[in-house]
Amino acid sequence: MDGIEQLNDVQQEAVQHTEGPVLIFAGAGSGKTRVLTSRIAYLIAEKNVPPFNILGVTFTNKAASEMQERIAAMSGPAAEDLHMGTFHSICAQLLRREGHHLGFNRYFGIYDVDDQVQVIKKLMEQYHVSTDMHNPKTIQGTISNAKNAMISAREYEKKANNIYEENVATIYTAYQKELRKNNAMDFDDLLLKPLKLFEKEPSVLQKYRKRYRYILVDEYQDTNKAQFEFIKQLGWEHKNICVVGDDDQSIYRWRGADVRNILEFEDTFPDCRIFILEQNYRSTQSILSAATAVVKNNDFRAEKDLWSAGDKGEKIGLIEAYYEREEAKRVLDQIQKEVFSNKRTFNDFVILYRTNAQSRALEDILRQHGIKYVLVGGTKFYSRKEIKDALAYIRVLVNPDDSVAMRRILNVPTRGIGATTEERIENYAFDQGITFW
């Protein structure tokens, strides 16, 4: 296959070892995406595997799209039959086709966090759970964490041992009933329902096992329990599962990711081959040595030592500041020094910060000195009010049972339907056990 000779020895080996379970520890900047795309192209070109029988799972839709483009450039039009996407998009497509086995029609709604909070807020009113005592967003997060750990409403209720958990258990149970009534799922359900489907309908599981003979998973260090089970179920018979990730880059524990999925992969698949990509193509050795010095202190990690064949590079500068405004001033001083002493422009600089709250001190100091800047971020396109309103109309058209979408557009544009009318309809629907529609 053209291009494979450009890979280093370890990368080539990882690409060509196609049968059986494979674990690839890919350090930052070590050519992970190149290895994944080359591996898929190799399966198609050299192993004559039909793209239809390959499943590629990525962390974002953007990554899936970019990888598919790269594979198409290497493999031609045949790559169009390749199924590649995120866990959520792959599971959503599966449920659109097979959800009827669980009592859902193919037009089920998918609730984002805002939708979930709205449902929970309504249920808290109906079940007299104080929103002053418990924040609806906090309860939504608790339910989401329970789902990520594959704890059902019934199991959560059994384990509840304080007032908060008892209230969550009440809302969790009612919330699941409300989703069912609205022919809707939340993002966590998209991962859980396929597992329930596989258990209930073994023939469906067998159908997808037969189709997906080769499974490749990117960013495996950020998978949760349900995602691990999904991949395990699909690939258990043929075991042609290749997972790629870096335990040192696991940052999503707060939303259910379990780094043990990658660290204990070989416990689940004892005969797996392990490849470690350590040559970095992105950074200087100074950067890599500093990064390694930090992460080597982690308690649980696979041993790896990134290195670069390039220059050692400049030493890293370190600024210690006691207050955020002092920190912002020191950062600006460094930038101005480079601009005036080394003839750089402000366009050459980017300031990275950890949380949105940290931007204020930096913005203040830049404004005070009359320095123009661009703040990257803000409200996402699909989170804008007018976009969510338009999508709510479409959701009601295809799924009239979706009460969250229905309530959103009830008075948009204004048509004289007030909160009191909406509340009466909501209460009547609740008492009668029917939908808002």
Image: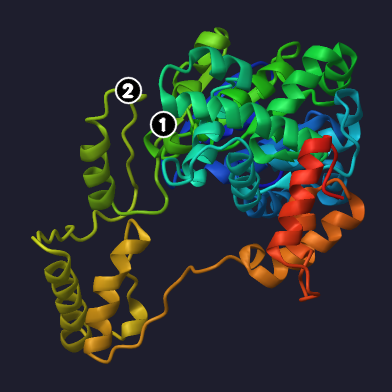
The percent position of residue 55, horizontal first and vertical second, equals 75, 33
Which residue does the numbered mark 1 point to in the structure image?
247
- The answer to which image quadrant residue 314 occupies is bottom left
Q: How crowded is mark 1: few (under 14 residues within 10 Å), some or many (20 or more)?
A: many
Q: Are marks 2 and 1 in contact (CB under 8 Å)?
A: yes
Which residue is located at x 40 percent, y 39 percent?
249
- The answer to which image quadrant residue 338 occupies is bottom left
Which residue is located at x 69 percent, y 18 percent?
19
Q: Nearer the viewer, residue 293 or 392?
A: 392
Q: Which of 294 and 170 is in front in this view?
A: 170
The residue under label 1 is which amino acid type?
Answer: Asp
Give the vertical position of 162 relative to 91 (above or below). above
Residue that sits furthest to the bottom in the current view: 370
Q: Which mark is residue 300?
A: 2
- The answer to which image quadrant residue 103 occupies is top right
The percent position of residue 218, horizontal first and vertical second, equals 59, 37
Q: Nearer the viewer, residue 274 or 237?
A: 237
Is disc 1 placed on a helix, strand or loop? helix
The residue under label 2 is which amino acid type?
Answer: Phe
* Sequence-first tag of 2 and 1: 1
The percent position of residue 248, horizontal first and vertical second, equals 37, 35
Give the vertical position of 87 relative to 336 (above or below). above
Left or right of 342 on screen, residue 12 = right
Give the vertical position of 425 relative to 94 (above or below). below
Q: Is residue 45 visible?
A: no
Measure the alpha-carbon separation of dots 2 and 1: 8 Å
What scheme was used to colour the molecule? Answer: rainbow
Question: Which image quarter holds the N terminus?
Answer: top right
Give the vertical position of 420 relative to 86 (above or below). below
Which residue is located at x 86 percent, y 38 percent?
96
Q: How crowded is mark 2: few (under 14 residues within 10 Å), some or many (20 or more)?
A: few
Which residue is located at x 57 percent, y 8 percent?
271
